[in-house]
Amino acid sequence: MSLPPPVTGSVPHDPEGHEEAMAWFEAEHAVLLAVADAAGPAGFDGHAWQLPLAMADFLHLSGRWHDWVTTQRTAIVAARQQGDRAGTALCHCESGRAAIRMRRYEEAHRELLRALELQRGLGDLTAQADTLRTLAWSYEQQGDYRGALQRVEQVLELQRAVGNLAGQAGALNNIGWCHTHLGDHEKALARCREALRLHLDGGSPLGAAYTWETLGFIHHAMGQYAEAVDSYRQCRDGFRRFGNRYGEADALHHLGGSLRMTGDQEAARDAWHAALAILDELEHPDADVVRELLLTTAG
């Protein structure tokens, strides 16, 4: 998404790294939400859809998913009113992502298929790859790993066509995730190791964190619990660095399970307590799952 130059008299702020950017959003998000809500009625349709898109990753990573849903609905209306087809497609895709997090899968599919329709009409291969990857995530969240695999293989083809190495790494990690859930752990390991190499070579630590998460799952499924513990710790540290609160909690949840299998019950419970604290803060339903683990392993 390209932006026009700043207006005369304004002073753009350029954060030095992810941590500073997240801190800025944390301090300013309430103001930004108010501005996004007011921009459309005031006649600033461009701001009314571009600002929600700019905030989307922060709202996702910080667990403010209700705000994520609401802002994207506003953004779709504004992008349509401005007649920006590419922008409208981006907003539909982001709305689909938010709906998946809220487990509203039918809504997500409608949004994502509308985004794909617009992006195919525009011939935008990169945007199509992003939307297909999100659609695959929706299938995966519903347990349809064959459906997800079909779509992430399409994503890999598109990312290779445009030469996007980071996109290829993400697709390879998703392919590995699907393969391990379909029972082919060795193929999954190969895909994820290739993904991790691309992420590390390309300087994408957040992508690497997601890949460490998949590797942890694969190693655990193969009974390689020490390797799973190491992978989940790498994942936890990566998500913590990037302010991905739910990702950190999920990594801690699974870290506890792998630690338990190594026989270290105390460390497992410490991990689950840390996960529960974050999930309770986010008011996430996964908190009940972790709370039950702590109850059943008490004493």
Image (spheres, helix red, strand yellow):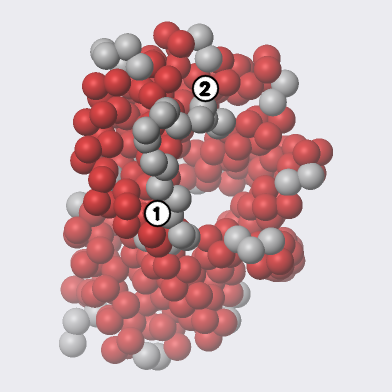
In percent of width and height, residue 87 lies at: 52, 22
Image quarter (top left, top right, bottom left or bottom right) of the N terminus: top right
Q: Earlier in the sequence, mark 1 or mark 2?
A: 1
Q: Residues within 10 Å of mark 1 (few under 14, many from 20)?
A: some
Q: Is residue 155 visible?
A: yes
Residue at image mark 2: 87
Q: Disc 1 residue type?
A: Ala
Q: Disc 2 residue type?
A: Gly
| Quarter of image, res 264 | bottom left
Q: Is residue 247 visible?
A: no
Image quarter (top left, top right, bottom left or bottom right) of the C terminus: bottom left
Residue at position x 42%, y 20% in the image: 46
Label 1 secondary element: helix
Q: Nearer the viewer, residue 203 or 103?
A: 203
Residue at image mark 1: 21
Residue at position x 59%, y 46% in the image: 145
